[in-house]
Amino acid sequence: MEQQAKKRIYSAIQPSGMLTLGNYLGALRNWVAMQEEYDCIYTVADLHAITVRQEPAKLRKQILETYALLMAVGIDPEKSLLFIQSHVAAHSQLSWLLSCYTQFGELSRMTQFKDKSAKHADNINAGLFSYPALMAADILLYQADMVPVGADQKQHLEITRDIANRMNNLYPNVFTVPEPYIPKIGARVMSLQEPTQKMSKSDPNVNAWVAILDKPDDIMRKFKRAVTDSDACVRYAEGKDGINNLMDIYSAVTGKNYQEIEKEFDGKGYGDFKLAVGEAVVDALRPVQDRFYDLMNNRDMLETTWRSSAEQAEAIARRTLGKVMKKIGFIY
Ligand code: ATP
Ligand code: LTN
């Protein structure tokens, strides 16, 4: 019997500074798990990053670190493609083509555009506005079947689907219309200081979030200071947002369920629990950090890896770009 091809997954992350425990438990751990079942293509979205002003040396460092960190968490370039978006020119090329099939009105409705243009009022550039056309190009170039995205990117995936359907109506079968992928497991990690808000690296209060590369002492300090409640009993319940969040984190890194955690800390105070969560997170991140620093000392290997992945990606991307250009009417 002919073997059915694996479904293809595409995802990307911007190299916009420190990745957090939220990015790790909510997104990257799933990226790693999906490699076993799917044909995965992962990208460091550096072209997206310049929609807000970047300092050249800092951007270069962040692209390199984000790439190394993706390998350190377990993305395996032998199993998946892992490359830097700007290394495959077809992303920019298809983005232009798609932007001519994307309407001003629909781009104006994007909440990320509205938020970011309010935040960067001095630099509301055309790239920030047409950001979704580049994201659609990323996904559609590889004819991806599924895209794992968090809540904040759902609207961008919707517009990608609209663009793909519009193109398919004009030029039959040009694109696969991607589905959102909702992972089976996936923690939503909340701020350690305001546990009703999601943990976010752009939070100016550094005690609210844990970076994947934070030192053990800093991780322990942040957990010791985590906001809890006055109930003094480790149990999962409505209104106990701080404790619920710590239980979710503990569960995600140890594999224990709520019942097991409640039993383990029966009769113990929050102090003991916070220490245990901190230590479990330190233990979970230690191998990632060790691999990261090894990789950063091996720049040649990183370069060889991203080049090889980009070459393989390019072969797929050029095929799609050629098809689109021919259908539109270019002499290709
Ligand atoms: P920012 O805080 O600057 O908006 P971010 O930390 O939300 O950035 P993104 O780059 O927008 O990070 O997200 C990358 C991926 O990580 C997305 O898939 C997103 O859903 C996931 N993610 C980010 N924060 C969390 C969190 N606290 N819990 C679970 N998943 C998260
Ligand atoms: N916009 C996304 C990153 C991103 C992406 C993509 C995600 C760029 N291209 C394609 C999924 C598919 C973000 O900022 N999180």
Image (spheres, rainbow, N blue to C red):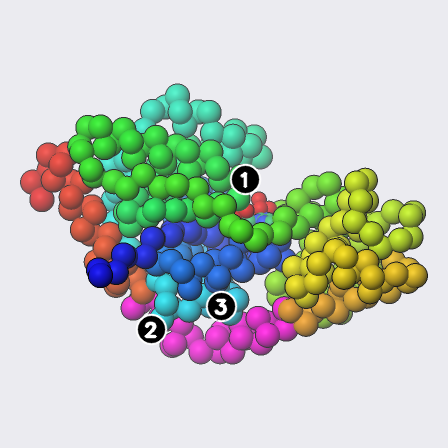
What element does badge 2 sit on? helix
Marks 3/2 in contact by CB < 8 Å: the verdict is no
User: Is 156 displayed left or right of 273 in the figure?
Assistant: left
The residue that mark 1 highlights is 151
Marks 1/2 in contact by CB < 8 Å: the verdict is no
Q: Amino acid at mark 2?
A: Thr
User: Is 88 displayed left or right of 119 in the figure?
Assistant: left
Q: Residue furthest left?
A: 331
What element does badge 1 sit on? helix
Residue 123 visible within the image: no
Number of residues whose C-alpha sits closer than 10 Å to that of mark 2, classed few (under 14), some (14–19) or many (20 or more): few
Q: What secondary structure characterizes most of the magenta part?
A: helix
Q: Nearer the viewer, residue 34 or 46?
A: 34
User: Is 202 displayed left or right of 15 in the figure?
Assistant: right
Q: Amino acid at mark 1?
A: Ala
User: What is the spatial separation of the Cα atoms under label 1 and label 2, in whole angstroms?
Assistant: 34 Å
Residue 75 in picture, x, y percent from top left: 45, 65
Which label's residue is closer to the chain start, 1 or 3? 3
Check residue 74 in the rendering and tell me which mark sits there, or answer none: 3
Check residue 304 in the rendering and tell me which mark sits there, or answer none: 2
Number of residues whose C-alpha sits closer than 10 Å to that of mark 3, classed few (under 14), some (14–19) or many (20 or more): some
Q: Amino acid at mark 3?
A: Gly
Residue 308 in picture, x, y percent from top left: 29, 68
What's drawn in magenta, residue-wise? 285-308
In the image, what residue occupies the spot 20% across and 37% down?
Answer: 173
Image quadrant in which the N terminus is located: bottom left
Q: Taking 86 as reference, is 96 above or below it?
A: above
Residue 106 visible within the image: yes
Which label's residue is closer to the chain start, 1 or 2? 1
Residue 240 occupies which quadrant of the picture? Answer: top right
- Choose mark 1 or mark 2, whichever is in front: 1
Residue 303 in picture, x, y percent from top left: 36, 71
